Amino acid sequence: MSDFSIGNLLDDEKRASLQSFSENLPPKDAPRSKKDIVSRVAYLIGVDAKYFGLTADSAVNPQFYRTVYDNLNADKEARIVRSLCRLRTKLQRSFKAVCIEMNSDVKNIDSIPDLIPPEILRSLEDDGISLVRPRKRPEDYIIDIHNYLLPHVPNCQKFFPSWLKWTYIRSLFFISKGNTVDGNREAARLYYECRDLFPYQAYINWNPDDRDGNILRDDAKFIPVLYERNRDKFYDMSKVTDAGDSAVNDPAEFFGKAQRVLIAIDCENADPCKVIGIMKELERRNLSRKITKIILVDDEHTSPQWRALRRNDNLPLEYHMTERVKDDKSAVDVALAVKFYREIVQAKAEGSPVDSAVIVSSDCDFWTLIELTPEVKFMVMLEYDNCSQAYYQRLQNNDIPFLYIDEYFRAGSLELKTEIVLQEVIHDIEEGILGRVNIFSILNRALTKLDLKMNDTEAANFFDRYIAPLTVTFAKNGSAVLQNKPALKE
């Protein structure tokens, strides 16, 4: 028995329209998703203008933002990419028919308007790209399109936010071996077999799966799928929904409303460089004055970078190093929760209760601590790459503000890295290498070796005249070199 579906009875346009109303719809109680990113992608890959509400076709409801279309269409680079993608889709969709027209009837792509709309070629001509050449095969044109996309697609990165990984977007436009006939032939075969699974039947570099549904339904659908296809995970749904009010970009409002703030730092589940940067920024903006205590709980296996924070005498730090009962089991989260809760109870008993608290950790285990202390207003500082979707959703649903420290303070800051590394180097020199050096011990060893003696006055004069002026510098190979050495007789 042959396969039967309603889709087989529909033409291309009706199938594409039906795809946008697939069963893969968001739940009724889900936050309203944005369509900003998918509108930009849809424009660039050449999705028909009617899905932006640009035509009088009342049968199609706008699926994307008209303002995005207008803004991108005013940019030459975006127009070029859209036109090239539209042309490639037309060639892929009607490849056999185009081959017959061009090979049998000796036509070119500019003389088969039923298959290749003339306005695509005119738009490219207006923007300085003349594709039409005599005696070219359809596959040659597809290779030309790939080569033209190479320099123009990168110029469209400016249309996407910095938090979105551009390499994943860029990969949609380029197939493997796209400058070869074989590479494009394989892409054409996949598109021909699975055309209905491509977004609005626009060709992209994608291995379609019917379980994905309409990947350009909205940002909340598209971006997680895009990351997953690149073996990555996208967690920050506040970026793609209008219900992302719990995500804050600046801690100033939280600290402004607080009277006494207690901070707990989970050294196992926080990046020290980023946390140090946050603390320095809080100091700089005079927000740290409301901090009553910072509980820092560490583990022997964490980064030594935490020493740079512990050396900050301006912050009320309380540092704890936990010991492991089992090598594969840390006690940091339990110790931090106990110390944190004890501090809350003690402060209340002393008549100076903590009204606000900050947990610096991406570990969802601390949610119980938040539930146990409803009288305290919490803010969570976490890392974008380490926060689970479930934890994010729990915070969101309970209106607990959270700050992505990745976005607030970039760990790649050269100034911060320089300071932390320099502190560590100086620490190791002073407390490590130089801490073990005592010049009088060296002098006594020399006298013993040479079987000589100096009284206290002679030793003090020797130090003042010959040792004190010495300085240590470092050669380019890293070796220590003594400078200002006295001239010695040969």
Image (tube, helix red, strand yellow):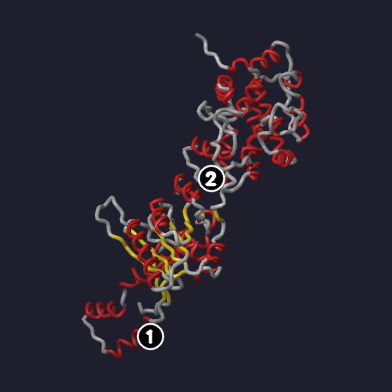
Which residue does the image show at 37% across and 69% down from the upper left?
346
Q: Earlier in the sequence, mark 1 or mark 2?
A: 2
In x, y percent, where is residue 333?
A: 35, 56
Three-letter amino acid code at the position of disc 1 = Arg
Query: Regarding mark 1 in the picture, which secondary structure is present there?
Result: helix
Which residue does the image show at 23% across and 79% down from the upper left?
450
Query: Is residue 428 in sight in this rendering?
Result: no
Observer-nearest of 212 and 128: 212
In x, y percent, where is residue 155?
A: 66, 42
Q: Give me the C-alpha separation between circle 1 and circle 2.
A: 69 Å
Would residue 234 be found to the left or right of residue 66 on screen?
left
Three-letter amino acid code at the position of disc 2 = Met
Query: Regarding mark 2 in the picture, which secondary structure is present there?
Result: helix
Would residue 147 be found to the left or right of residue 471 on screen?
right
Would residue 358 be found to the left or right of residue 442 on screen?
right
Residue placed farthest to the top in the image?
Answer: 1
Observer-nearest of 117 and 126: 117
In x, y percent, where is residue 58?
A: 73, 28
Residue placed farthest to the bottom in the image?
Answer: 457
Observer-nearest of 391 and 460: 391
Question: Looking at the image, is 337 positioned above or below residue 54?
Answer: below
| Crowdedness near tag 1: few (<14), some (14–19) or many (≥20) residues, C-alpha within 10 Å | few
Q: Residue 86: which numbered mark, if any?
A: none
In x, y percent, where is residue 102?
A: 70, 15
**Residue 442's image quarter?**
bottom left
Residue holding disc 2: 237
| Figure quadrant of the C terminus | bottom left
Single out the mark in the foreground, 1 or 2: 2
Residue holding disc 1: 465
Query: Is residue 99 in sight in this rendering?
Result: yes
